[in-house]
Image (cartoon, rainbow, N blue to C red):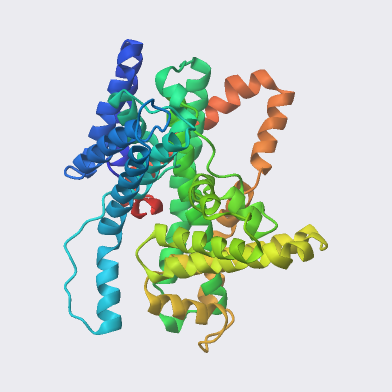
Amino acid sequence: MVFSSTFFLFVFLPAVLILYYIAPRKVRNLILFVFSLVFYAWGEPVYVFLMIMSTIVAYITGLLADKNVKGRKPWVPKLSLLIAVLWNMGLLLFFKYTNFFITTANDFFGLKINNLDIVMPIGISFYSFQTLSYVIDVYRGDVEAQKNYLTLGTYVALFPQLIAGPIVRYKDVAQQLAKRKETMSNFASGVHRFAIGLGKKVLLANAVGKLFDVISNTPQSDMSVTAAWLGIIAYTFQIYFDFSGYSDMAIGLGKMFGFDFLENFNYPYISDSITEFWRRWHMSLSSWFRDYVYIPLGGNRKGKFRQCVNIMIVWFLTGFWHGANWNFMIWGVYFGVILLCEKLFLLKGLSKLPKIIGHIYALILIVIGWGIFAFDDFGKLSQNFRNMFGLSGIDLINDQAVSWLGTYAITFVILIAASTPLIRKLGSFVKKGFPVVYSCVLQPLMVVSILVLSTAYLAGSSFNPFLYFRF
């Protein structure tokens, strides 16, 4: 993490909250902006200036992109939008993909170009999309251009969601940036949501992540088909609880400061199709590509063939956005093909079958997809799939796999339950039947317990960053 976890929990966050709430309302954006820059600069002391420059570019191009300003030449907003696109996409291409392009060119054309010494700035994929969407929305007339640089800077740098999302659009928080009301109810709700997210990450994702690490590094002689599937299922849970945990923490922190960020996950593993899965998983990214790529390309308005092409473009770019490795592009195309098949004929067939069939179908394809996503080393990726489908001569199951199953059986039961609305519904039932006991005893006890257990775990464990920090 940018700060160590314990420093963030016990020093940085309390300091920001105390200063924020004792300060006059008119300087609270300034406090958030300054501390957000400190938060980012702690891990990226040089690249913080890059983020500031991106904000300046967004500020200037946003002011010039407004087509409704009287007397403004028509080419000025178009040029401003073009500059914003070139700046943000240029940053991503340079920092995230330069060495990928060099390596690919070397492999394909036998060149010997040395890779550049480039370190990718943390969170650049997220804040680049945020600043770009702001300028696009101004150009479209969906929002007014922000004339106060501090307000726009607070939006871009806001530390709760800066590093790994969700991708917060300016138009969703514009009014809150100008005027928001902090309440004890929202603050308590934020603490609760933050604790849930921290528990997801530390107590669930980290725990099952250890199993994936062990299995993915197990010698081939000790592997089995069961173990290979168990490892990818472990990763399937790890990436969900890791990323949704971060999103919960960001949403919770936002509530503490008076912001309402949109949800980013909605129990994606209960889906009955891949189409439904992508309506529930990383919703801020899916909606971003829909609104700023798919629809501008024509969406479904220009015939079936063009729609299919648009879907494949979006999903190739979705994979490309995740990282500079071929496995991410394959992963994006994989889901694009499935979504195309569902759009053309599969969804009609699935609708006629029992829901359990659709659910099993979706889960199998989701797990296979994470099998592609998990390994950026092609040797490991291909070996893992050979193991999963019994093509490498290993046993169906062995003693090691049985041992792992026994050791993690209770963990998997908890993970499965936590991946569904079951726990939330149980909480709602208790709250409805015993509102005072739930609000005054059970909920505070749960929050304190999660915070204490998570802190104890962090204090005694090795460094384990969020998976999406690398994207």
Q: Quadrant of residue 274?
A: bottom right
Position of residue 159 measured from the top left corner of the image (x, y, whole percent): 34, 34
Position of residue 354 measured from the top left corner of the image (x, y, whole percent): 81, 61
Q: Quadrant of residue 337?
A: bottom right
Pick whichever, 222 or 315, lies toward us.
315
Pick whichever, 438 or 169, lies toward us.
169
Q: Is residue 342 left or right of residue 442?
A: right
Q: Is residue 152 above or below residue 116?
A: above
Residue 293 seen in the figure: yes
Residue 194 seen in the figure: no
Q: Residue at x 45, y 46 (%)?
A: 201
Report the residue that reaches farthest toward the bottom: 393
Q: Residue at x 53, y 53 (%)?
A: 294
User: Which of the image's four quarters has the N terminus?
Assistant: top left
User: Which of the image's four quarters has the C terminus?
Assistant: bottom left
Q: Is residue 397 left or right of residue 56?
A: right
